[in-house]
Amino acid sequence: MKVICIVLISCFGIACNAKTHENILIGRVKNYPAKKIYLMDAYLHDVKDSAYVKNGNFKFSIPVDKKYSSELSLSITKTYDYQKVLVFKNDILSVNKKLYGGTSFILDDDTVKITGDYNNLNHFLSIKAGNENKLIMRYQLNEFGYIQGLNADQRQQKIKEIKDVIQNNPHSSFLLSKLYLNKEKYSKTEIAALVSLFDNDLRKTIMGNKFQIYLDNRLDAGQKFFDLKLKDDKNNVRLVLDDKKLNMLIFWASWCGPCRMEIPQIKRLNTLYKNKGLNVVSISIDENQMEWYKALKQEQMKWDQFLVDKADIEVIEARYNFSSIPTTIFINGAGKEVYRISGYADNQFAAYKNVIDKLISDSE
């Protein structure tokens, strides 16, 4: 089983009330079990706001100083606990007596209303909101934009379906954000064509700008990587690639558990191949340099270590086309990608060894 760390984004484009410059969230929940309720980012779980609850009633009036925000959840406790997050009935998928529920929503209408009885079966509540929330419900079990594992005909049919959905919902920041999460599964031409279908104003938001940075920096298939200059663990800026060897670039971070779990396997590979034409390079996307240094001291990795400047992380992710770590990319002496492996697995050493043996043999 593969394990990865997703590079999370919290700037999903969400529309606000243009007239009042605030979003209103009203709740009437019988038997609510606490005196306060907490509004959280649905993915990062940081608290955005809180409100007192009286007789099951609560209200959030959220000023909006920018046009777009993020998917949200409501929690009984200030510290995230998935058992303490309010669950809303999925009215689109809940048919034929089969119930589905979700925990995230978007403030996409003048007023979002949450009602029901907390003591109901599964604690399911009702949510009344706008079109973005209908899209959340529609794609709860079938992630929008996901096209991995399809043959050529299925892939083209799926892309056509995705195109039709975007054309019917060109203002949807939810769809744009989900497409962003799956962007590396498309060719550069495919993803650029899909992004162009969204509304112009939406493409000027934070998420839209992230997509533009990605498209500006992503390489076309088969295009040569420009040699990268990064700061190493001695604080020297130098070239990363060796044009006389097979380069094994490992993108990781100190906070990424699967990345740290993979290191013993990389140590074995480095020992086995360092004198046989393999150049192992670890490239960290840590934003905290001291945490990176701490991890280097703990792990004692005897190969080149580099750190991406915080301001350049998005560009590097776009250039090398990844949004999860660990991601390992093999680049030949001509500067072209020849293979990649994403995620961590306990038995990955054998897979790496087979790939490296073949690539080194092919280059001789």
Image (cartoon, rainbow, N blue to C red):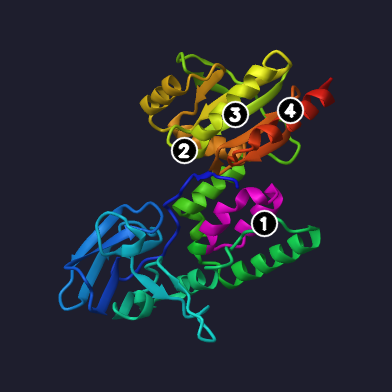
Whichever of callouts 4 and 2 sits on the residue coming sooner in the sequence is: 2
What residue is disc 2 on? 256
Check the picture and name the quadrant holding the C terminus: top right
Q: Is residue 358 toward the left or the right of residue 65 in the image? A: right
* Residue drawn at point x = 42 percent, y = 36 percent: 255
- Image coordinates for residue 347, horizontal then vertical, percent: 64, 38
Return the residue nearer the eye: 169 or 276: 276
* Residue underneath mark 4: 356
Q: Secondary structure at mark 2?
A: loop
Element type where label 4 sits in the image:
helix
Disc 2 residue type? Cys
**Residue beneath label 3, please?**
265
Q: Secondary structure at mark 3?
A: helix
Is residue 217 rendered to the left or right of residue 363? Answer: left
Residue 74: x and y in percent read 31, 65
Magenta stretch: residue 202 in it?
A: no
Identify which residue is drawn at 51% across, 71% down.
135
In the rendered image, residue 260, in percent from the top left (x then y), is placed at 49, 32
The secondary structure that dominates the magenta segment is helix
Residue type at mark 1 is: Ala
Q: Residue 14: x percent and y percent?
A: 42, 62
Q: CA distance from mark 1 to mark 3?
A: 40 Å
Vertical comparison of 101 with 295: above or below: below
Q: Which residue is mark 1?
A: 193
Q: Nearer the viewer, mark 4 or mark 1?
A: 4
Q: Which mark is first along the chain, 3 or 2?
A: 2
